[in-house]
Image (cartoon, coloured by chain):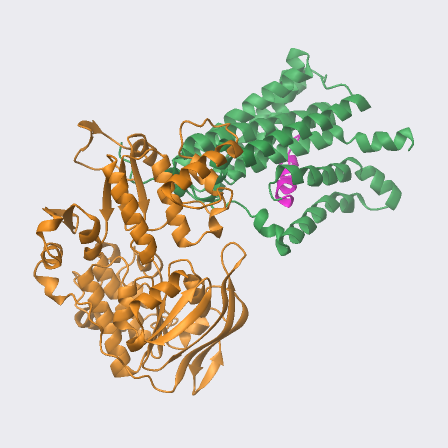
Chain colours: A orange, B green
Amino acid sequence: MYVPDSGEIYVNGKRVIFTSPIDAIRHGISLVSQIPQLIGSLTISENIILGLERFGMMTNIRRVENYIREESEEVGIKVDPNTEVWKLSYTQKQLVELLRAVMLGAKVLMLDEAITFLPIREKRKFYKFMRKFASQGGSVILITHKIPEALEVADRISVLRRGKYVGTVETRTVTIDDVRKMMFGERSAQITYERLPTSTPDDKVVLDVRDLWVMGDYGAFSVKGVKLQVRAGEVLGIAGVAGNGQLELVQAIMGLRKVSKGRVAILANGGLKDVTNKGTGKVRSLGIGYIPDEPLKFGVSMENNIEENLAMLPAIAKGIIKWGQIRGLANKLINEFKVVTPSSRTPVKLLSGGNIMKVLVARELSIAKKLLVAYNPTRALDEVTAVMVRKIIKEKVLKERLAVLLVSEDLDEIFQVSDTIAVMNSGRIVKTFPAEKAEREQVEKLMVM
Amino acid sequence: MDAGLIAIILGVGPAFAAYYLTAIGHGLFEKSGILNLAIDGVFTVGVAVAYVAALFAGAAVAGSVAALVVAMAFGLLIAYLATKLPISHGAIGLSIMFVGYGLAALIAVPIRSQINAVVSYPMNVGVDVAFIIFSIVIGVLVHYMLSRTKLGAAIRAAGENPHAASSLGVNVLRVRLIAGMLGYALIGLGASFYFLAYTPAPYSEGMGMGQGWIAFAISLSAGRHPILTILSALVFAELLYNKFVLQGYLGLSVHITKMIPYLAALVAMVIFMVTPLKRKLAPPRALGKIYFKEERTV
């Protein structure tokens, strides 16, 4: 995918230069990433055959189906190879990715956060498979930001920090704190998985969603009759495995995706105002902050500087932009959130991921008068920054009675911040708990049920 | 049925073959994700090349082969430019369209001013039927290739998401070059049939211009599906071929009869956009998107 600017890669002692993924595959290196790299409109067999070089271009796909079926049974996966990939759940897609990697004859299996968001039961299956794979002479490189995961499965742990190699240790000689220190240096003390203080919600309902039906990208319903309420001073955390309708739900609430049936209402002038299908502009004008999934792609404009990234929101600047005011706001937010930047006029792309994220969170919190909708707000952040972002959000909830709808695929995050936890599965909210009474095991079970 | 009516119905053969082959060539190429706006220019070149080559070789088949080869070269060029460089597909397509218009005149007009003859395919009902069968066989083969073979899956993958396709092991450039070659071979063949079988007449400048767009509409109104395109091409070809009959029978103005095929296309597109066919016949997701790997340094 990338070609190194300098440095060398050796496979079995031979120097290699990979200019495309297929080169790497030919050398027995397969990558499974966090986001399935499959093509939705193609079937499982079509997706898999594309990488299998022993089949010529004119091979009939039907001929490969049986072969795929046999192989998948061997790996312990039940899939009908004739299914189109968009119909699969996230977990199934990841299983297909793994099957693909194995069928490509991988000797080195690279898992880039590939199992981070899988339910625990599937994870354990993966762990077992990885052990078997390794014992048969294969190697596995597991890239993860979850230290316990690394400690559980790895023989050796290597730490990278900001693109630099820190060191490698034998797993059985280290503790979780040792690894954390390697990853974050002195800052490691700031990391905590403790629950943040619980807030007692007011009676005032800020977001009211009723019987919401929303289509996914492929014409099937992804959200099937969701009902939820978020009150002032409450964090409602929606737990779920990726691809169970959370994305569509959030987009529908924010006016970014058409609602087929049902209603979204937001508190305005003392009463609930219907904003169903009224568009993002309308929703945002009611004082709603939004942190989208893949925030670095959809939340900021990388080419523009911090001031411009603030001014682009109608809630901050309307019509003619008063740059003096914007600069004032920018500097205020930079100080408040300790954004490390040469100036408020530095293009955002020159900042580190954590600092960009701080700019985004600061901006959204500054306009979120009533409600913040956040989807995986700390994905792609290092743990220290992630914890900081969560603390800032929670503080706003406690002090300013902000209502927060937090959708996250990271259960640690859900449990750390939420006051109420709702579990979403196959487009439905299957259960809602007060966070203090929710048990992790039960939540996980409901997520994959 | 009387012989006259049969002749009217089957007489559409050459027109059908010309539009159908061009339309499935277009659909095949666009399935790989490249927005094909050059079609009309290359179609016009195909007509000119077919005219000149058939004339010099004294055989219509030679005209078809030459048009096919020349169009193929255009297909390769378009596929290469659109895949390898960060230039908009629209800019590439429209530039090549105008190059095509000019090139066609350059090739054919000087010849026309010296020689006043046309070599064409024979015209009779047997040949008409042969054209229909030949083009439908090609259509079925294209459909088989697209839906059942690895090459077809690779073409669709490149059209849906070239980056993911590449990480799945598809050589996007190669696949698009193949799609460009095959698609434009059919467009060239269609153009040659248009001139050498449908409207054999002394060449005049700009001949064939606009016909590529008709094929474009035929392909789109069938959602680029090779089998469905049989239907849309047949409707278009009948309406165009019999436009004078329609005029005579219904007393419609020639301008209105010329509009009818396009109105039919519009209706067809509306029909499949509001029905579940919308998903089945959805355009490739990466159609017209720039695919360019910036990080390449080797």
- The one of A23 and B92 positioned closer to us in this rendering: A23
Q: Tell me if A113 is positioned left or right of B95 in this view.
A: left
- The one of A86 and A443 positioned closer to us in this rendering: A443
Q: Position of residue A50 (x, y in %)?
A: 43, 35
Residue B204 sits above or below residue A94 on the image: above
Which of the 4 image quarters holds residue A337? bottom left
Name the residue rendered at 41%, 41% in the picture: A73
Q: Is residue A323 visible?
A: no
Which secondary structure is most common in the magenta stretch? helix
Q: Residue furthest top?
A: B57
Q: Position of residue B90 (x, y in %)?
A: 49, 42
Q: Position of residue A91 (x, y in %)?
A: 39, 53
Which quadrant holds the C terminus of chain A?
bottom left
Q: Tell me if B19 is positioned left or right of A432 in this view.
A: right
- The one of A358 and B48 positioned closer to us in this rendering: A358
Q: Is residue B284 visible?
A: yes
Q: Tell me if A78 is positioned left or right of B222 in this view.
A: left
Which of the 4 image quarters holds residue B196? top right
Residue B202 sits above or below residue A145 on the image: above
Which quadrant holds the N terminus of chain A?
top left
Residue B221 within the magenta-colored segment of the rendering: yes
Residue A180 within the magenta-colored segment of the rendering: no
Q: What segment is highlighted magenta in the picture?
A: B206-222
